Image: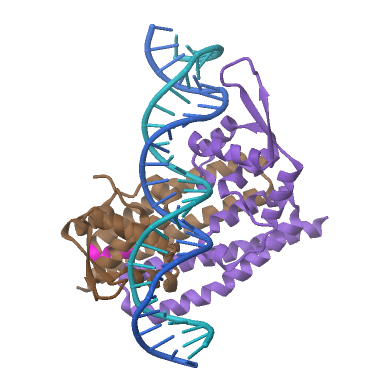
Chain colours: A purple, B brown, C cyan, D blue
Amino acid sequence: MKDDQSLLGFALLGLIGQNPMSGYDLRKIFASTALGSFSDSPGAIYPALGRLEKGELVHGTVQGSSSLRPRRVYRITPKGLAAFKSWLKKRVTRDDVVRHTGDLMLRFAFMDQSLGAKHAMRFLGEFAEEIAGYIPILQRYVETHANKMPLSGRLALECGIQEYRTRLRWARASIALYEEKEDQV
Amino acid sequence: MKDDQSLLGFALLGLIGQNPMSGYDLRKIFASTALGSFSDSPGAIYPALGRLEKGELVHGTVQGSSSLRPRRVYRITPKGLAAFKSWLKKRVTRDDVVRHTGDLMLRFAFMDQSLGAKHAMRFLGEFAEEIAGYIPILQRYVETHANKMPLSGRLALECGIQEYRTRLRWARASIALYEEKEDQV
DNA sequence: AATGTCATGTAACTAGTTACATGATTTA
DNA sequence: TAAATCATGTAACTAGTTACATGACATT
């Protein structure tokens, strides 16, 4: 039931799931979109693809075997799709919200394509709930410690709180948007 | 001129610079404050302290040498203080803003304690400018690619943009706050 | 007597990083 | 003809992770 893959692995798996690609294609995506803050270095991507293939989550097919470096196109396997979906479906935890927002956003970005709107809404609900629970804790922390902190330390914390508020607003607005769509149908 | 230390190293250096402490003290701080998303695991902290000491950025003094595991209290060296300050003073780059916001916030949190309000303001100015330059790029990306993206992908991107806006507002408000303080004196 | 806290550390493993390497084909 | 792009990979290194180990001392 555990993950077994790094975040990069799941990003690759998600992209390959959308349509089959080579390592080079994936590198270009990471180099151009900048999103997710993944590196496009070959030293990260090719070993990660190797791990995915070893775990039988993807399967590579050689194209143009004549050349020295034949292009290997990877496609997702049923096992890979299952692993990907179970990663998407994981419950949103407090720890995710506090120190792995990037992971959560990546999961959400892939979500309604792979699982549909229902799951996306459930995810947003859990996400909003965890943040809503965490903000008061941070605020209480500020209240009790602010006097002992330098101004810039206090402000840095304040920035964090405001980011959480932004995410909470975003999550609630997104839920509303999905509900609207639902009603239209 | 290059860094030579990881983010964890600088966090330790900054804390030790505030007042001398042992590895165990540092672990407790990371375990209790949760901020910065550092691990309190001994396997991270003790080796990092060892690297700092090898680089002569801190110096450990043994307390209670009688026991098997004597408490080692670290204090920052002049060289360490210099390295820390030059880390704080680094220019804010686009890359920092896009994929290393955590690093920037850590730097800022330590800033006016170590360098004073003037530098904190300069930092905020650079930070705001880089974000202000980046937001339109993201927006243009959304405009051109939104139609090809699934809804959740679009929303995830939108969340990112709103986080940047929040940080920009925060930076500008913080600058105003420092200016107010300046006028009062 | 059992648990928890103080306090340090190591070992095995993992997944990144940068830099290098190869060589064909396309473009300026 | 020089450079960029296509396309894959390896090597050496780095700094994390979890789990384990030690043992004194204080509390329940």
Relative horizontal placement of residue D27, taking residue D25 as reference (left or right): right
Q: Say if the magenta span includes residue A176.
A: no
Q: Residue at x 32, y 74 (%)?
A: A149
Q: Quick one: B84 or D10, which is closer to the camera? A: D10
Relative horizontal placement of residue B36, taking residue A73 as reference (left or right): left
Relative horizontal placement of residue A148, taking residue C23 as reference (left or right): left
Q: Is residue A129 above or below residue D8?
A: below
From the top left corner, tell me how far across and down residue B75 is, in percent.
Answer: 22, 66
Q: Is residue A22 in view?
A: yes
Quadrant of res C6: bottom left
Quadrant of res A178: bottom right
From the top left corner, tell me how far across and down residue B70 is, in percent.
Answer: 28, 72
Tell me the magenta residue range. B109-116
Q: Is residue A41 in view?
A: no
Q: Residue at x 23, y 70 (%)?
A: B62
From the top left corner, tell me how far across and down residue A49 is, in percent.
Answer: 60, 38
Q: Residue at the left extreme?
A: B78
Q: Is residue B104 above or below residue A38?
A: below
Q: Quadrant of the C terminus of chain A?
A: bottom right
From the top left corner, tell me how far across and down residue A61 is, in percent.
Answer: 69, 28
Relative horizontal placement of residue A82, taking residue A167 as reference (left or right): right
